[in-house]
């Protein structure tokens, strides 16, 4: 469904993504992990058209390199950001509506907005300005606004950051349902290994922009090189 082929991104001297290739299959939950500064968020920025790069990114067989973010959104790729970004003066319902207006189908559909509010458990706070939401509700809103674009792929950037274990459980359940019930392919960048081993079917580890290991999550977290470069000896 989504294929990166020898993708390289340099910021001046810094090689943020280094000759990276991987493929995400339709219906998968695909995980990405690696130390801070490894290039994980940059991979999302390249897929969503924020920067030019070397190499090829294909979505459903079409090369999407050089397309603008709004074009890529219309193709059916949505994302959330590492730091929750909302429109503080809009209500929750309006924010999800904005996602729906700019989405893949291009036609505002109030019934769909309603279903997303319910799905993400945002109905009770629908009239609240987003600036006043709890962190958990901000995260639910970011996912909801992304879902409102009717994506084929949803890319999540460290969705569990700053959450306690109950919130992590609840967000994991939402992600599982987005994948299973809505049929949306998921890519998730996450530091919590337990989240990745429970949710994903393929896990990619990158360090300084380079692939260290990729495969089924149980095998990857037991890979000696992964333990050395990322997880540390204490993990075992
Ligand atoms: N717009 C940018 N300009 C310059 N350097 C950047 C930019 N974005 C990211 N970087 C650098 O690229 C590297 C990878 O960053 P990032 O993708 O955010 O890492 P991660 O998400 O894995 O923590 C870091 O060294 C970061 O400082
Ligand atoms: Mg990041």
Image: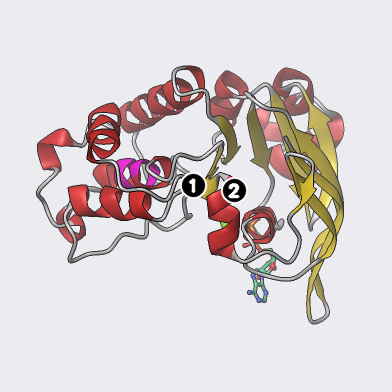
User: Residue 125: percent from the left, percent from the top?
Assistant: 13, 42
Determine if the magenta segment contains residue 58: no
- The quarter holding residue 113 reads top left
Label 1, secondary structure: give it: loop
User: Residue 27: percent from the left, percent from the top?
Assistant: 62, 23
Q: Nearer the viewer, residue 59 or 30?
A: 59
Label 1 to label 2: alpha-carbon separation:
6 Å
User: Residue 23: percent from the left, percent from the top?
Assistant: 79, 36
Q: Nearer the viewer, residue 132 or 236?
A: 132
Ligand 1 image-quadrant field:
bottom right
In the picture shown, does residue 108 fall above or below 66? above
Q: Residue at x 44, y 50 (%)?
A: 103
Q: What's the mark number on residue 104?
A: 1
Q: Nearer the viewer, residue 86 or 230?
A: 86
Residue that badge 2 annotates: 75
The prevailing secondary structure element of the residues shown in magenta is: helix
- Magenta-highlighted residues: 140-144
Q: Is residue 101 left or right of residue 61?
A: left
Label 2, secondary structure: give it: helix
Q: Quadrant of the C terminus?
A: top right
Query: Which class describes the residues within 10 Å of circle 1: few (<14), some (14-19), or many (20+)?
Result: many
- Visible residue check, residue 51: yes
Q: Is residue 189 left or right of residue 67?
A: left
Q: Residue at x 85, y 36 (%)?
A: 225
């Amino acid at each position: 469904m989504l294929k990166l082929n020898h993708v390289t991104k340099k910021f001046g001297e810094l090689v943020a993504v280094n000759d990276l290739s991987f493929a995400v299959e339709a219906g998968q939950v695909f995980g990405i992990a690696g130390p801070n500064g490894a290039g994980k968020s940059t991979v999302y920025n390249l897929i969503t058209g924020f920067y030019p790069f070397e190499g090829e990114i294909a979505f459903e067989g079409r090369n999407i390199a050089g397309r603008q973010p709004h074009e890529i959104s219309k193709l059916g790729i949505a994302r959330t950001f590492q730091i929750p970004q909302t429109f503080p003066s809009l209500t929750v319902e309006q924010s999800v509506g904005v996602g729906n207006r700019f989405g893949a189908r291009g036609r505002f559909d109030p019934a769909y907005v309603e279903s997303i509010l319910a799905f993400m458990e945002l109905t009770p706070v629908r009239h609240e300005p987003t600036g006043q939401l709890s962190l958990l509700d901000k995260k639910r809103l970011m996912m909801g606004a992304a879902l409102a674009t009717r994506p084929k792929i949803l890319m999540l950037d460290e969705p569990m950051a700053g959450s306690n274990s109950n919130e992590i459980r609840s967000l994991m359940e939402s992600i599982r349902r987005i994948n299973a019930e809505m049929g949306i392919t998921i890519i998730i960048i996450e530091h919590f290994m337990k989240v990745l081993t429970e949710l994903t079917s393929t896990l990619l580890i990158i360090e300084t922009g380079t692939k260290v290991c990729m495969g089924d999550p149980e095998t990857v977290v037991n890979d000696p090189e992964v333990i050395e470069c990322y997880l540390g000896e204490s993990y075992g």
